[in-house]
Image: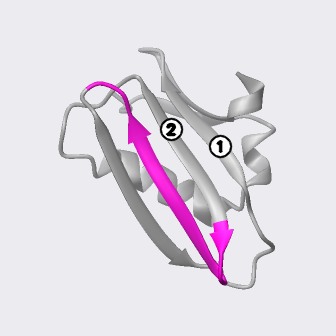
Amino acid sequence: MFKNKRYVTRGASSIPFWIQMILWLMIDSLDIEKDWLQVFNITTQEEKIHIIHTQEQPPYKRESIVPLNGESEITAKIFVIDDGEHSTMLLAEEY
């Protein structure tokens, strides 16, 4: 899973590119079976970006903190979906 062409929707493209790359890297570095739906909750806390990455089957949760890098505050829920032919990153409200 997630080894096919990757797409980012218009809504998800509002997330800074370097954060999008971190999310793809977090998926690529999973060392367990990947679910078709990856979920990321992103918030800004104390000059840092807090990312919670989850999936349902098998259950998985990882929390990461990265420096804000002068970007404006970010709050978003992002889905990354693998439909077998494409991997698509989108804001939860676009689903």
Q: Secondary structure at mark 1?
A: strand
**Could you tell me residue 24's position as x and y percent?**
46, 49
- Type of amino acid at the residue the image marks with label 2: Val
Q: Which residues are magenta?
A: 44-57
Up/down of 37 relative to 15, above or below: above
**Could you tell me residue 46's position as x and y percent?**
65, 82
Q: Secondary structure at mark 2?
A: strand
**Could you tell me residue 81's position as x and y percent?**
51, 26
In the current view of this chain or complex, which residue is farthest to the top? Answer: 84
Could you tell me which residue is drawn at 51 percent across and 22 percent down? 86
Q: In the shown orientation, is residue 94 left or right of residue 44?
A: right
In the current view of this chain or complex, which residue is farthest to the front? Answer: 46
Local packing at callout 1 (Cα closer than 10 Å; few below 14, some 14-19, many 20+) is some
**Which residue is label 1 attached to?**
77
Could you tell me which residue is drawn at 35 percent across and 54 percent down? 62
Looking at the picture, the colour scheme in use is: one colour
Quadrant occupied by the C terminus: top right
- Type of amino acid at the residue the image marks with label 1: Lys
Q: Residue 42: which quarter of the image?
A: bottom right
Could you tell me which residue is drawn at 75 percent across and 47 percent down? 13
Could you tell me which residue is drawn at 49 percent across and 60 percent down? 22
Q: In the shown orientation, is residue 50 left or right of residue 64?
A: right
Q: Residue 91: which quarter of the image?
A: top right
Q: Is residue 27 magenta?
A: no
**Which residue is label 2 attached to?**
39
